[in-house]
Amino acid sequence: MTLSRERMEDAVRSVVWFHSIDLGDGLVTPGVKSVTQLDQELRAFRIPDLQDKTVLDIGAWMVFLLRGGEAGARRVVALDHYVWSIDLAVIGRR
């Protein structure tokens, strides 16, 4: 099932985002950190070439390896328990 552009934009607006994530086709999540800032931070980590590798990102709150496409990762699996213990509705009202 493919979502319409309008439904995708509605879904993006329904979530509180910390990071700006380029979802493709000109759709970017409205995060506190810009895509440019995140790219600079990612380069500062000096992550090795992950070409064709599968990566397990433990503590994925920072999202760096979720954006593993820049490092060439074929697959990224993220695990982060903190997101489940945060009341995003409360954060969104701040």
Image (cartoon, helix red, strand yellow):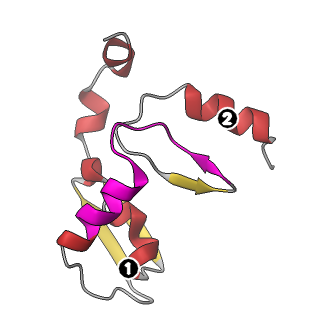
Name the residue at 31% across, 18% down. 91
In the figure, is residue 12 to the left or right of 8?
left
Task: Examine the structure image and report whether residue 58 is included in the region drawn in magenta.
Answer: no
23 is higher (above) or lower (below) than 83:
below
Location of residue 93 (image quadrant):
top left
Given contact means CB atoms under 8 Å apart, are the residues at marks 2 and 1 in contact?
Answer: no
- Comes first in the chain, label 2 or label 1: 2
Residue 58 rendering spot, x and y as whole percentages? 23, 59
Name the residue type under label 1: Ala
Name the residue type under label 2: Glu
Task: Examine the structure image and report whether residue 30 is included in the region drawn in magenta.
Answer: yes
Name the residue at 34% across, 74% down. 55
Name the residue at 58% across, 35% down. 12
Q: Residues within 10 Å of mark 1 (few under 14, many from 20)?
A: some
Quick one: SS at disc 1?
Answer: helix
Residue 42 is marked as none
Residue 39 rendering spot, x and y as whole percentages? 34, 64
Residue beneath disc 1:
71
67 is higher (above) or lower (below) than 16:
below
In the figure, is residue 56 to the left or right of 69?
left
> Which residue is nearer to you in this view: 34 or 16?
34
Quick one: SS at disc 2?
Answer: helix
> Which residue is nearer to you in this view: 1 or 42?
42
The stretch in magenta equals 26-42
Residue beneath disc 2:
9
Residue 85 rendering spot, x and y as whole percentages? 25, 28
